Amino acid sequence: MGNLRQMFGSLSALSITTEEHGYTIDTPKTIFSPPVKQLLDEPKRIATIHTRFERLSSIICLNDEEFWTCGDDKFIKLYNRKGKLLKSIKAKSGNHPIDIAVTRRRNLIYIDYESVYEVRDEKIHEIIKINWKWELFDSWDLNSVCSTSSDDLLVILHNGYRKQTKVVLFSDYKEKQTIQFDSEGQPLYSSDYSSRNVCENRNLDICVADGGANAVIVVNQAGKLRFRYTGTTSATNRSFYVYGITSDSHSHILIADYNNHCIHILDQDGQLLCCIYNHDLYRPWALCLDARDNLYINERYSGIIRKIRYM
């Protein structure tokens, strides 16, 4: 039975506890546990893909064969694994896209500083308008976006005047939850204009790579702090600087370390499992995974995307 479970995975019941109107509700939910995979001693490079971007900002897999990318211009481009350009979309507002995501229906999501957009049926729809105003104290800028397992959206917002940063969960295009402070009322995230990226782990934790804090901050679904990860001197030579973040089917958290040209892999409790150093990585920036847990890494300044198998 143990061998069969490793080969095919297993089903288990997940109990999610939520607070609603003063009552605690336990909702049973069946989830699939994937077959157990081991981290490879030597990760294998599957492909090196050259894009037409001079500077890459974000990447997200559409499926196992195709992925969306964006950079420091006004276009979002779809490539296949051989590096062929399949489609190019110009951002609607005229601003360059900040970050991209893909919904469970395979629709493209992108953000600029002011709004969230969805590409459906070959048309661009503005689905969320942030309360952006010319008055600095009321102005919130979007930093990052990801699509959750329940097809909601997590976005990071930053207010430079107030020096505040928060993660907001949108469900059906409406604000449902805000995560900003810890249990002692202290800010969870840094307050400057540094880069930040967000992803949802498979265990429903919300993980933020905070460049201003040089840390990864992980909270649970209720927004309570679970841990902070600030790198490790035993595995790196230079100061830890995070940008891209993603998670795989085993709830590993993968982090792009820009200064040390490597990828940190943590378990779901924040323990470092290993670092990926080889494969000629230089200035890794954004990360994503396909359904087979193949890792895509874009390099900030080369326009190169590296596809790596690490499990």
Image (cartoon, helix red, strand yellow):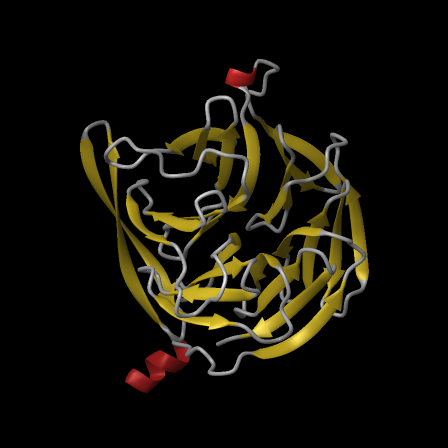
Residue furthest left in the image? 23
Q: Residue at x 71, y 71 (%)?
A: 48
Q: Residue at x 38, y 48 (%)?
A: 217
- Say which quarter of the image contains residue 64: bottom right
User: Is 135 situated left or right of 163 in this image?
Assistant: right
Question: Would residue 1 be seen by someone viewing this image from the given angle?
Answer: no
Q: Closer to the camera, 145 or 30?
A: 145
Q: Residue 236, percent across and down?
A: 46, 67
- Say which quarter of the image contains residue 123: top right
User: Is 244 situated left or right of 26 in this image?
Assistant: right
User: Is 177 situated left or right of 244 in this image?
Assistant: left
Q: Is 113 rendered above or below residue 246?
A: above
Q: Residue at x 54, y 25 (%)?
A: 140
Q: Residue 26, percent across and down?
A: 22, 45
Q: Is 148 rendered above or below residue 157?
A: below
Q: Closer to the camera, 138 or 26?
A: 138
Residue furthest top in the image? 135
Please state, as top left, top right, bottom left or bottom right, where the N terminus lies in the image. bottom left
Q: Residue 184, percent across and down?
A: 23, 34
Question: Would residue 265 be seen by someone viewing this image from the given angle?
Answer: yes
Q: Residue 247, percent across and down?
A: 46, 59
Q: Residue at x 75, y 51 (%)?
A: 77
